[in-house]
């Protein structure tokens, strides 16, 4: 039986400032570092070997993974993949969420933030925030770099990567740890738990609380749970 462990990175500086972050490469806040440490401590109590780790091109997820692996005394070798990047928020990038909601109205705000297939307006090609993207992004094929994304667009890059790269390692009995982002993990959970387009807006992924998914040898899900039950969110399955 193999295990897939999904961990959302700890609070970032822009999370603390309530800004749309997306692909901007910001650091963890002090609270975020503590949340990453808490994730590592929870995983240590689980007492399982992490065979392979994956993360995105963004340093808040990379730093979270690094803190966890150090606590687990695991090898620091891990795989980075742009496909696991956070959703690209287009022209919303850098804007304060509350101020944006007041400006565009709650209904449109919800569509941009939580709908399945509505993307914000594209980011300007001369946006100042492009300078704050991860230097690792230079390795992304030019025709794959978005200027905005819906959750569906994020799903369309996360799921093929999972199918092509991660699934084979789970089939071989490896325990996999992914340190990623709220929306890239929501996209993956939509696929794994067969969540409908209309119900996916209800799925929340908490920070600092790893989700464990246990598979049988045919990759059928047997169990799924958060390690800290006091801060667990509802996991939607087949709805």
Image: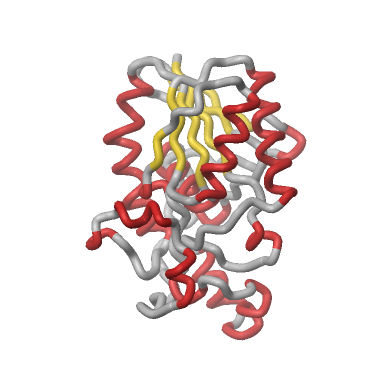
Q: Position of residue 118 (x, y in %)?
A: 42, 69
Closest to the observer: 37 or 106?
A: 37
Residue visible at 42% across and 47% down?
A: 84
Total numbered labels placed on residues in the image: 0
Q: Nearer the viewer, residue 72 or 197?
A: 72
Return the residue found at the far right: 230
Q: Quadrant of residue 220?
A: top left
Q: Residue at x 39, y 80 (%)?
A: 126
Q: Is residue 228 left or right of residue 4?
A: right
- Left or right of 208: which side holds 1? left
Q: Position of residue 173 (x, y in %)?
A: 39, 15
Q: Quadrant of the N terminus?
A: top left
Here the colouring is secondary structure
Point out the residue furthest to the bottom here: 103
Residue 35 percent coordinates (x, y): 70, 41
Q: Residue at x 37, y 51 (%)?
A: 155
Location of residue 2 by image quarter:
top left
**Residue 201 vertical placement versus 162 (above, below):** below
Image vertical order of residue 47 relative to residue 179, above or below: above
User: Residue 200 location in percent, x, y?
Assistant: 50, 52
Above or below residue 13? Residue 60 is: above
């Amino acid at each position: 039986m193999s295990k897939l462990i999904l961990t959302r990175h700890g609070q970032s500086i822009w999370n603390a400032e309530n800004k749309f972050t997306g692909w901007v490469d910001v650091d963890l806040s002090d609270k975020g570092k503590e949340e990453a440490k808490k994730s590592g401590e929870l995983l240590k109590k689980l007492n399982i070997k992490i065979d392979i780790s994956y993360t995105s091109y963004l340093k808040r997820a990379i730093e979270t993974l690094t803190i966890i692996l150090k606590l687990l005394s695991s090898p620091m070798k891990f795989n980075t993949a742009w496909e696991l990047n956070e959703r690209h928020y287009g022209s919303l990038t850098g804007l304060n969420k509350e101020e944006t909601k007041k400006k565009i109205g709650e209904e449109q705000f919800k569509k941009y933030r939580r709908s399945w297939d509505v993307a914000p307006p594209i980011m300007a090609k001369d946006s100042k925030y492009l300078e704050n993207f991860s230097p690792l992004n230079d390795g992304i094929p030019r025709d794959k770099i978005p200027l905005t994304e819906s959750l569906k667009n994020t799903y369309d890059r996360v799921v093929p990567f999972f199918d092509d790269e991660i699934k084979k390692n789970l089939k071989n009995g490896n325990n996999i740890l992914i340190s990623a982002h709220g929306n890239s993990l929501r996209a993956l959970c939509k696929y794994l738990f067969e969540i409908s387009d209309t119900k996916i807006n209800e799925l929340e992924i908490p920070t600092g609380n790893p989700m464990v998914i246990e598979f049988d040898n045919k990759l059928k899900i047997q169990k799924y749970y958060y390690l800290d039950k006091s801060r667990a969110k509802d996991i939607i399955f087949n709805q």
